[in-house]
């Protein structure tokens, strides 16, 4: 009777007995807890799946809105770039046109001033020529008048001998040594 039992067989049988006792005492409650845990687990998994779907849907909507906003900003930036390029080109063409206009106006003004200077130069040369002619004419008249005056002076002047004779006659008359013919 003393049979040797296998040492590992005893704990396995004891574990089975404990499991059976547990099942008898707590079996209904454990099954109820397990069922509740499974239901809770299923609800949590369903809620988690729902949350995932909701999150993915919201992320997709947000990405779509962001993509739309980015695209809108890119279009606005491109349009702004095109507008600014056009504005720069327009400004450049207006500046070039203004430079051409200014150059033309300056050239016209220079040409006008050159013409005025040429006309003034011509008038001054003509006036100088007229003054020169008038001066020469006046000089010739003065020279003629001087020549006439010299001739008159020569014809009316007394020569040295005539003056010496006149003074000698005056001296003699003063001395009383000279008598005029016809006064005696």
Image (cartoon, rainbow, N blue to C red):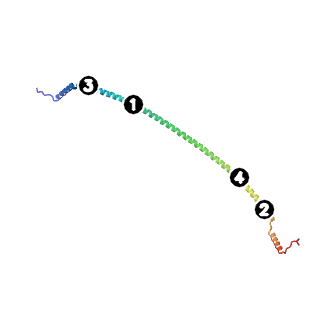
Choose the circle earlier in sequence order: 2 or 4. 4
Residue named by callout 1? 58
Image quadrant in which you'd find residue 99:
top right
**Residue shown at 72%/54% (left/top)?**
131
Callout 1: few (<14), some (14-19), or many (20+) C-alpha neighbours within 10 Å?
few
Residue named by callout 2? 149
Choose the circle earlier in sequence order: 2 or 3. 3
Choose the circle earlier in sequence order: 3 or 1. 3
Nearer to us of marks 2 and 3 is: 3
Q: What kind of element bears circle 2?
A: helix
Q: Using the numbered discs, state the Cα–Cα distance from disc 1 to disc 2 in whole angstroms.
A: 130 Å
Closer to the camera, 4 or 74? 74
Q: Using the numbered discs, state the Cα–Cα distance from disc 2 to disc 3 in whole angstroms.
A: 166 Å
Residue named by callout 3? 32
Nearer to us of marks 3 and 1 is: 3
Q: What kind of element bears circle 1?
A: helix
Q: Using the numbered discs, state the Cα–Cα distance from disc 3 to disc 1 in whole angstroms.
A: 38 Å
**Residue shown at 32%/27% (left/top)?**
43
Choose the circle earlier in sequence order: 4 or 3. 3
Nearer to us of marks 1 and 4 is: 1
Q: Position of residue 58 (x, y in %)?
A: 39, 30
Location of the N terminus by quadrant is top left
Choose the circle earlier in sequence order: 1 or 4. 1
Q: Is residue 75 rendered to the left or right of residue 31?
A: right
Residue named by callout 4? 127
Q: Are marks 1 and 2 in contact (CB under 8 Å)?
A: no
**Residue shown at 73%/55% (left/top)?**
134
Callout 3: few (<14), some (14-19), or many (20+) C-alpha neighbours within 10 Å?
few
């Amino acid at each position: 009777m003393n049979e040797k039992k296998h040492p590992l067989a005893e704990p396995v049988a004891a574990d089975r007995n404990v499991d059976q006792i547990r099942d008898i005492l707590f079996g209904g409650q454990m099954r109820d807890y397990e069922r509740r845990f499974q239901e809770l687990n299923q609800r949590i998994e369903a809620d988690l799946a729902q949350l995932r779907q909701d999150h993915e849907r919201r992320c997709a909507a947000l990405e779509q809105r962001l993509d739309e906003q980015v695209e809108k900003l890119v279009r606005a930036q491109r349009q702004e770039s095109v507008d600014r390029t056009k504005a720069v080109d327009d400004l450049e063409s207006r500046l070039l046109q203004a430079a051409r206009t200014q150059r033309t106006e300056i050239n016209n003004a220079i040409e006008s001033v050159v013409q005025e200077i040429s006309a003034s130069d011509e008038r001054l040369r003509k006036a100088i020529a007229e003054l020169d002619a008038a001066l020469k004419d006046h000089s010739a008249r003065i020279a003629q008048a001087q020549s006439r005056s010299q001739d008159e002076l020569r014809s009316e002047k007394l020569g040295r001998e005539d003056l010496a004779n006149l003074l000698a006659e005056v001296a003699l008359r003063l001395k009383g040594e000279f008598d005029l013919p016809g006064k005696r």
